[in-house]
């Protein structure tokens, strides 16, 4: 019988969402691997399956609303909210910072689950948590499909991760020979 981890990795491979090459991540780090979760979004049955797996690890009574950072978390956040029968909102970039727009609001004391596709350093998740706090909401938890932080991303609220899969990352001035020889690609997050 296939383990949960094996199933998740199979889904990434089948959809072409795990890429190999030379990539610049949103964090600015370089890597030979990239999780392009937008490719998963082409297969809504796979998105639903990953959302189902994620919800198996979360108590849906612990949150009122799902919030996803754009762009990566949008599809997954919406599906988690749909399956949990919860309200769904998102934050999006304004001048390279996340902001709550489009008339969305967070009520004082509203319990929010942040859903993201992939974290490396967790920067967008931290921004989302800051917005929740500034609006008077309560961050109930974070749910992530892939944590590639090697355990370095930590938060003050519970983190639920479907799969931890870390590939080496490098600063631009410390690239290994094998990455230097490949054209760089910034596929977007």
Image (cartoon, grey):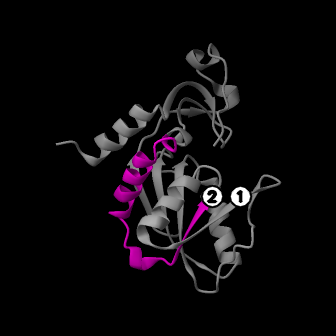
Q: Nearer the viewer, residue 70 or 124?
A: 70
Is the residue under label 2 in contact with that under label 1 (CB below 8 Å)?
A: yes
- Please identify the quarter of the rendering in which residue 23 is found: top right
Residues shaded magenta: 40-69
Q: Position of residue 141 (x, y in %)?
A: 49, 69
Q: Is residue 176 visible?
A: yes
* Number of numbered discs overlaid on the protein picture: 2
Instruction: Please report the residue visible at 47 percent of the width from the left and 66 percent of the height from the top.
Output: 82
Label 2: few (<14), some (14–19) or many (≥20) C-alpha neighbours in 10 Å: many
Q: Is residue 153 visible?
A: no
**Cα–Cα span, label 1 and label 2:** 6 Å
Instruction: Please report the residue visible at 47 percent of the width from the left and 45 percent of the height from the top.
Output: 150
Q: Is residue 26 left or right of residue 159?
A: right
Residue of label 2: 69
For residue 111, above or below residue 151: below
Instruction: Please report the residue visible at 64 percent of the width from the left and 33 percent of the height from the top.
Output: 187
For residue 44, above or below residue 56: above
Q: Position of residue 45 (x, y in %)?
A: 40, 48
Locate the C terminus by quadrant.
Answer: top right
Mark carried by residue 92: 1
First-in-chain label (1 vs 2)? 2
């Amino acid at each position: 019988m296939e383990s949960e981890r094996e199933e998740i990795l199979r889904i990434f491979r089948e959809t072409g969402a795990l890429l190999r090459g030379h990539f610049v991540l949103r964090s600015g780090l370089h890597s030979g691997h990239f999780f392009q979760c937008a490719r998963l979004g082409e297969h809504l049955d796979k998105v639903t399956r990953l959302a189902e797996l994620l919800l198996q690890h979360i108590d849906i009574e612990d949150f009122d609303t799902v919030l996803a950072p754009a762009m990566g978390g949008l599809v997954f956040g919406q599906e988690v909210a749909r399956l949990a029968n919860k309200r769904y909102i998102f934050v999006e970039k304004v001048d390279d910072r996340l902001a709550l727009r489009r008339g969305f609001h967070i009520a004082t004391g509203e319990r929010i689950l942040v859903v993201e596709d992939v974290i490396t350093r967790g920067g967008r998740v931290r921004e989302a948590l800051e917005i929740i706090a500034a609006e008077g909401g309560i961050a109930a938890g974070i749910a992530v499909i892939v944590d590639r932080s090697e355990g370095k991303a930590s938060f003050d609220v519970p983190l639920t991760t479907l799969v931890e899969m870390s590939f080496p990352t490098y600063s631009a001035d410390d690239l290994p020979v094998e990455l230097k020889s490949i054209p760089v690609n910034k596929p977007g997050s």
